[in-house]
Amino acid sequence: MYKTIGFLLLVLVLTGTENVAAQSPDSYFVAKTVSVPGNLKQPLRTGIQVGFDDYVYIEALGKIRVGLFYGSAYPVGLPKSFDNFFNKRRSVLHGALMWQIGPESGSCRKMFRSYDETVKNIFMVSEDRMIKEDGPNYVAGDYFLSKSTGELMLDINDNDVDNNSEQYQVRIFVLKQYYHVNRNQFNHCPLKEPGDGEHDRQGNGWIREWPNSWVYHGFNNSYRGTGKYSGCQCVYDRGTLLRGTATDTGNDQGSFDFGFWLGNGDADNMEARHLHLILDVLPHDLWVKRYGGNNKKMRYSPPQVFVK
């Protein structure tokens, strides 16, 4: 059973100073699922405090009934032909799910779009998560690095909601860059390269990753941990662990991945891969784009070793 408490509940909210080591990976990010009713009359307070430059991921499922004649709207809103004077924001489609952090705001967009049932990033997004419409299918939501500080608020783009019904189910993740680059304190690796499917002295299994992962790690062999070492990724050059340092950006070391930790290390499971996309891949890409320049790697702290 997956550790999808990240899907269902607000896990431990980040507290304390940044130099205090976390006791568990779930203390490194915020995860919460909330219901947003279609007849919401004022912005919904999520209770999630977002800081400047925090990574925020919002994914919305379901649809709401909008008025007596417009029918149902997905979280991205009704087509432009339904635009009317009842919009709270004229630049956003009617009935769309909107978010706000301080003065910054946005709305759901079509993410991870697919054509003919084939998802572009097929190993990251399952078909049952896609909204199916005429044209490309998509996942409704938004992800970004926050430019503001404040509580995350959710709202419906409709100022006459008395005849609306049903609700959106919204999944939210928030992650700070500090915790993203320091998550390798949870990355435990054997010093010597394990065999695919073999177990270490403590009985923990290691699964060799699919070949296309080589390009991310200097074409070296990489392995995923299982059991209590779910989320661990270990990379080896001719049998020796690549450990790297916090300031060495040229190494091809592995990284502890929150998504696979939540998914019990099952890299073949679609939900685990989707969580990996949400919590590891997207924030990495956004922070590299903002700060990386010519350096296309993040600076991760070195992995720990538990088998000699």
Image (tube, grey):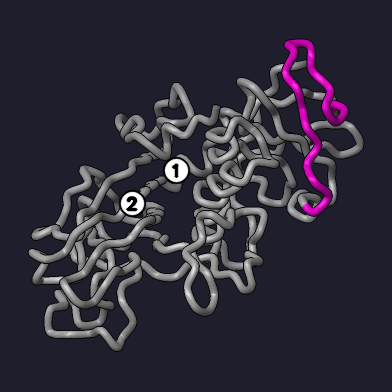
Query: Which region of the structure is painted magenta?
Result: 194-212
Quadrant of the rendered structure where residue 303 is?
top right
Q: Looking at the figure, which quarter contains the C terminus? A: top right
Instruction: State if disc 1 and disc 2 touch (CB < 8 Å).
Output: no
Query: What is the CA distance from the residue labelled 2 to the residue labelled 1?
Result: 25 Å
Q: Please say if 142 is above or below 85.
A: above
The amino acid type found where label 1 is placed reads: Tyr
Report the mark closest to the observer, 2 or 1: 2
Q: What residue is drawn where x is 17% and y is 52%?
A: 44
Is residue 161 shown left or right of residue 279?
left
Is residue 125 shown left or right of residue 170?
right
Q: What residue is drawn where x is 54% and y is 65%?
A: 112
Q: What residue is drawn where x is 11% and y is 66%?
A: 163
Q: Secondary structure at mark 2?
A: strand
Q: What residue is drawn where x is 34% and y is 66%?
A: 74
**Circle 1 residue:** 178
**Circle 2 residue:** 170
Q: Closer to the camera, 123 or 19?
A: 123
